[in-house]
Amino acid sequence: MSTLLNLTGQLDAETVNTLSDVNEVATQLNIPYIIVGATARDLILHHGYGAAIQRATSDIDFAVQVDSWDTFEMVKRELCTRNFTETPMQHRLTNSTGKPIDILPFGPQVQNNSTIAWPPNGNIVMNVLGFQEACDNAQSIVIRETPYLACPVVTPEGFAILKLIAWQDRPKPERLRDASDVGYLFSVFRRLDTFIEKLYSDNNIGDLERYEWDTDLAVCFLLGKNCKTIASDQTKAQILKLRHYSNDRNVSRIAEEIQTGNASDNLKFVEAFMDGLSS
């Protein structure tokens, strides 16, 4: 896990305390975890690279790799000793000021293929495909220097994977946020020199030539190519199905639901990403 960003002093005290509490519990129980969702997006792209915030978020999402549902409950119990409170939603806790955090379990022992079914009756099913790859390839970000706190955060590649899986899995209108996040990620990659400069390395110059030096398309291809390096075969195949579905869950529909720009251009970006993923 690489440490590339130092965000000391950039986050509010409440967020730092929440991240510290979860990190302490995960470390104490020896449980791998990762920060996902909108908070992860903002930690890396806004605080780390200076991209504008797309929309505010009030909660923090964590994914925890557990070996049983008992271990998942243990995580929640330990957090409740640190002034968190359980809610009627099994995956949600609130801190002392009422700010929510979501704890999402994954791992072979609690999954049935790519999904988890929440106990006791299993009526609520959640797709956790991609969480393992995101956790295994997390980026460690320094949150605080003293006392030292570094947390694992989903990378842009992991974020793209999770959002494309979530978009396929969720109904409207919930999935509109996922499409919006995919579009935001594409726009950040297309605008920030940090990502565009990578196209001019010896390893990637062919990607520019492929798209006749159109950096907008080439950088989306590069993002897809980078996702390919971390995605499992199952995850990659599930995302690439978007090219073949004839229902309303396909590349054309997600291009329409990105909402920024126009659907025609968005479709080109999505297709370039898919080209990279399948390269």
Image (cartoon, helix red, strand yellow):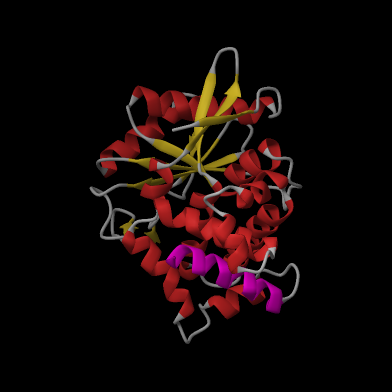
Q: Quadrant of residue 205?
A: bottom right
Q: Residue at x 27, y 50 (%)?
A: 110
- Magenta-drawn segment: 263-279
Residue 48 lies, with reference to residue 228, above or below; the image says above
Residue 240 is a magenta residue: no
Q: Main secondary structure of the magenta part?
A: helix
Q: Position of residue 208 (x, y in %)?
A: 62, 61
Horizontal side of residue 207 vs 212, given as left or right: left
Can residue 250 be seen from the camera position used here? yes
Q: Position of residue 131 (x, y in %)?
A: 40, 50
Residue 277 is a magenta residue: yes
Residue 126 lies, with reference to residue 1, above or below; the image says below
Query: Nearest the camera: 10 or 268?
Result: 268
Q: Position of residue 204 (x, y in %)?
A: 55, 54
Q: Residue at x 74, y 67 (%)?
A: 260
Q: Position of residue 78 (x, y in %)?
A: 39, 27
Q: Residue at x 69, y 62 (%)?
A: 216
Query: Nearest the camera: 257 or 21?
Result: 257
